[in-house]
Image (cartoon, helix red, strand yellow):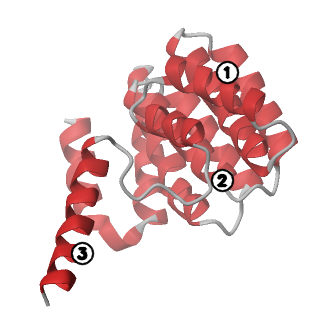
Amino acid sequence: MFKKNLSLFLFLLCLVFSAMAGECFAVAGVPPILEQAKTQDAKGQYEQAAVLYQQTLTEQPGSEYAAEAQFHLAKVKILLLMESNNDAAAQAAADALIAVYQGNPDLPKALYGIANKYEWAGKYKQAKDAYQLILDHCQGSPDAAKSNLHVSRTNVLALIDSKNFDAAGAALDKFIVDFDGNSFILTHLKNSIMS
């Protein structure tokens, strides 16, 4: 009994220390550098993530991990272009990402993250275009289902942002009809925006 409890205690202690080191639940076999890159990417530390993805490519040439790192590096480069307000280059890089990685199961999530970043930055036209890319190239994915709503919403926000209130009102009316399940909330939203 003592041995069993000691083993359990040591296991739990190991989990605590590995969590403190940021390595808790790392996927077996995945190079630590790739895990670190993903962590930096998730934190929005794109420059550090790019360096670590590049290092993974150097250390794991030709491996499945190199392919994964290459995909994420391409995505991170788009995010860096967005941060530097180089939207034309970011759009070209997104088009290249789609061309190269069409069919990659991580593509819808990557594009959704890009679209969300634009939306949160108040760049509604770019967000709408990015959500539309998901609809055009990732049909059937959960992110495509969510993007349909976002395309309509960011269209309304882009029109409001451009001070085209008549067109925004018409787009909002269409939005309400298209997404009728929440019409009470949407009508209330329309009334508060248009007043």
Q: Quadrant of the C terminus?
A: top left
Name the N-terminal-most of marks 1 and 3: 3
Residue under the image location 72 percent in, 57 percent down: 138
Q: Amino acid at mark 3?
A: Ser
Callout in the foreground (2, 3):
3
Residue that mark 3 sits on: 7
Q: Is residue 166 left or right of residue 191?
A: right
Q: What is the quadrant of residue 139 in the picture?
A: bottom right
Name the N-terminal-most of marks 2 and 3: 3
Secondary structure type for disc 3: helix
Q: Check contact, mark 1 vs mark 2: CB within 8 A.
A: no
Distance between mark 1 and mark 2 Cα atoms? 18 Å
Distance between mark 2 and mark 3 Cα atoms? 38 Å
Residue under the image location 44 percent in, 46 percent down: 153
Callout in the foreground (1, 2):
2
Q: Which of the two residues, 5 or 133, is positioned nearer the viewer here?
A: 5
Name the N-terminal-most of marks 1 and 2: 1
Residue that mark 2 sits on: 106
Q: Is residue 136 left or right of residue 42?
A: right
Q: Quadrant of the N terminus?
A: bottom left
Q: What is the quadrant of residue 39 in the picture?
A: top left
Distance between mark 1 and mark 3 Cα atoms? 52 Å
Residue 130 is situated, as x and y percent measured from the top left of the image, at: 62, 38
Q: Amino acid at mark 2?
A: Asp
Q: What is the quadrant of residue 59 in the picture?
A: top right
Residue that mark 1 sits on: 90
Counting other residues with Cα less than 10 Å from the Cα at mark 1, is it few (<14), some (14-19), or many (20 or more)?
A: many
Q: Amino acid at mark 1?
A: Ala
Residue under the image location 87 percent in, 41 percent down: 62
Residue 162 is situated, as x and y percent measured from the top left of the image, at: 45, 20
